[in-house]
Image: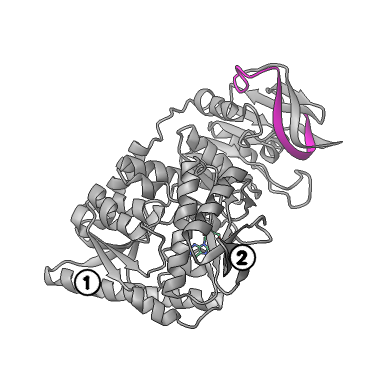
Amino acid sequence: PVIVVDFGAQYAQLIARRVREAKVYSEIVPHTFTVEQMLAKDPAAIILSGGPSSVYAAGAPFVDPKLFEAGVPVMGICYGFQAMAQALGGEVAQTGLSEYGGTEVEVCSSGMLLADTPEHQTAWMSHGDAVHKAPVGFEVLATSDGSPVAAFEDTHRRLFGVQWHPEVRHSAHGQQVLEHFLYEGAGLAPDWTPGNVIADQVANIKAQIGSARVICALSGGVDSAVAAALVQRAVGDQLTCVHVDHGLMRAGEVEQIENDFVASTGVKLIIRDEKERFLTALAGVSDPETKRKIIGREFIRVFEDAQREIIEEAGEHGEEVKFLVQGTLYPDVVESGGGEGAANIKSHHNVGGLPDDLDFSLVEPLRTLFKDEVRAVGRELGVPEEIVSRQPFPGPGLGIRIVGEITAERLEILRRADAIAREELTKAGLDNEIWQCPVVLLADVRSVGVQGDGRTYGHPIVLRPVSSEDAMTADWTRLPYDVLSTISTRITNEVREVNRVVLDVTSKPPGTIEWE
Ligand code: XMP
């Protein structure tokens, strides 16, 4: 792999994704890794990421000069660039001129790294220190007002660096610079493609599972669907999927899994219709945390029942059920420490919170993938587009989008309003601009309206369109007024109980994406 060394800012994941966009496989490791640990991964190239420190601050992450003697091509970015300059005997100091945001860079010699990019270009910067003198053997490629040395390379030793952030879209030629490093600098080929990912994973899954049986909780979301399709491709009928229909799904979703997904993948699927059970358990409850707990608890009970039946049935044929498929993604792995000593930002629970004392080995075929790659793999496997392009949807479903008690009637109101919003957003071609758009029913709120000649006293619907890279932070999406207007008109006309549509214009933080 190409190894991205994380110096502690938000940038490492973005770099890893851009490398993969260049069709080269990448992995993130913490900067606390020793050179030996890095080399043990047999890296084809190494990228040192940006970070919040100053290289000469006490306790600043340090780059072992041995790294540059291993013969592996290295590229330093921002902090990584400065740490590299310092480790190799260059000079790093404060210029008194910090550069933040779009910055004009002047190319003095394009070299290998900046080949075919313009003499003047805009690059995204974020630094206070700067490299004043390049180490011996390096050619200076660019400068800016605040960076006497803004880029350098030593093509003999295959060492490269830029002060700016090529991984950020605001750097006009960023992707090109990264690709020059990967293709020419490190001599790598663009062969990380969905087809190859599938071939690799199918081989891994076969080796892991052998002839045992495996089960998967299919939520209806992209991740569990693609994970199941991959396992099905590898071991066919050894896989049984269970979908717990808790009645909190959106319009058409269960049918999509039941018909289209099964038809296109051949997955063996058991659907447990548990709508009544969930409604009964949730009756009279309006506290958000209590609702979440009840939904999680009932989900586990139903899944355990299904599991027991599958195990008994398999046992009759002398087979063992030993594996459970989970749709864990790479960002979850990185953020939960990746088992490699990175900071534990948060621990994740997947698949609607399955218990952690299950007596199963996990099969996690998406552990190395980012969301957009999961979608590409899903398409290649023939998973229906309606599922592959589905926006994130919380495990507790519409249950946490009804503010107030959950009833069958309220679910139906929300389902109709949500279907209209989704239909119009898709029709307007906005699906790719929106991360997700929760539609929320304020079931306990009523307001006065007028329709025809009569007074109405109905409920508001909230539209919550957000843009985000990873759901950790988000901004509200500036939807075109005419689309908002169409959605509002249609919802108030077609859903009798709703007489008002409002737009949530809060970023995250302070607002979460979901309302509960
Ligand atoms: P919040 O509301 O915390 O949501 O800003 C962040 C992202 O997580 C999703 N979400 C959930 N997903 N189970 C899930 O599988 C949950 O309980 C849950 N709660 C929130 C939410 O839709 C958004 O994408």
> Callout 2, which amino acid?
Gly
- Mark 1 lies on residue: 311
Residue 128 colored in magenta in the image:
yes
Between 371 and 249, the one nearer to me in the picture: 249
Disc 1 is placed on an element classified as helix
Mark 1 surroundings: few (<14), some (14-19) or many (≥20) residues within 10 A? some
Mark 2 CB in 8 Å range of ligand 1?
no
Q: What residue is shown at x 52% (from left), y 79% (from top)?
A: 290
Residue 267: percent from left, percent from top? 24, 55
Pick the residue in front: 511 or 179. 511
Where residue 88 appears, as percent x and y from the top left, is 69, 33
Q: Which residue extends farthest bottom?
A: 284
Count every numbered label the image shows and give the total. 2
Q: Which residue is mark 2?
A: 449
Give the percent coordinates (x, y) of residue 327.
Answer: 40, 56
Q: Is residue 176 above or below residue 488?
A: above
Density class for disc 2 (Cα within 10 Å; few <14, some 14-19, many ≥20) is: some
From mark 1 to mark 2, how far is it between C-alphas?
A: 56 Å
Residue 436 visible? The answer is no
Residue in the image at 27% along x and 71% along y: 307
| Observer able to see residue 68 | yes
* Between discs 1 and 2, the one toward the N terminus: 1
Q: Which residues are magenta?
A: 112-135
In the image, 95: left or right of 385? right
